[in-house]
């Protein structure tokens, strides 16, 4: 955390959440994230991935292009 200049008190669990979230927000497929985190069940990985409201708002419906 010092090397990354993170000033908040956060444990390894929080770092894993952040890691998974940043990967997802940068377009990494959730199956790759599952592999990187070493999860057997995709449901476990999905608990680690939080999507920002900014990214949700940017989603365009395929119906909008009709």
Image (cartoon, rainbow, N blue to C red):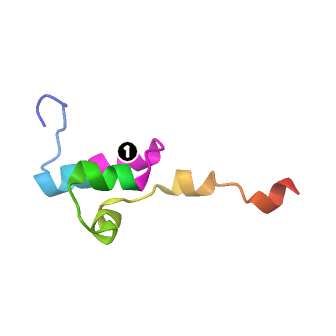
Q: Which residues are magenta?
A: 19-30
Q: Position of residue 7 (x, y in %)?
A: 17, 39
> At x 73% / y 60%, what residue is drawn?
61
Q: Quadrant of the N terminus?
A: top left
* Residue 8 appears left or right of 26: left
The residue singled out by tag 1 in the image is: 23
Is 63 situated left or right of 37 in this image?
right
Instruction: Please state which of residues 28 and 56 is positioned toward the viewer in this rendering.
Output: 28
Residue 54: within the magenta? no
Foreground: 10 or 30? 30
User: Residue 40, how many percent across, how many down?
Assistant: 23, 65
Q: Is residue 11 visible?
A: no
Dot 1 alpha-carbon crowd within 10 angstroms: few under 14, some 14 to 19, many 20 or more: some
Residue 29 lies within the magenta run: yes
Image quarter (top left, top right, bottom left or bottom right) of the C terminus: bottom right
Residue pictured at 44% horizontal, 57% vertical: 51
Residue 46 falls in image quadrant: bottom left
Q: In x, y percent, where is residue 57? A: 61, 56
Instruction: Give the answer, above or below, for where 62 lies relative to 19.
Output: below
- Considering every residue shown, the one lying at the far right of the view is 66
By secondary structure, the bulk of the magenta-drawn segment is best described as helix
Whole-percent x and y of residue 9? 12, 49
Q: Is residue 61 left or right of residue 39?
A: right
- Left or right: residue 53 versus residue 21 is right
Picture quadrant where residue 5 is located: top left
Q: Using the image as rendered, state which of residue 6 and residue 30 is in the foreground.
A: 30
Decide if residue 60 is in sight here.
yes
């Amino acid at each position: 955390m010092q090397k990354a200049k993170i000033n908040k008190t956060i444990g390894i669990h929080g770092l894993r959440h952040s890691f998974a979230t940043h990967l997802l927000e940068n377009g990494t497929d959730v199956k790759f994230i599952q592999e990187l985190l070493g999860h057997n069940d995709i449901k476990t990985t999905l608990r680690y991935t939080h999507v920002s409201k900014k990214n949700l708002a940017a989603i365009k419906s395929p119906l909008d292009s009709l």
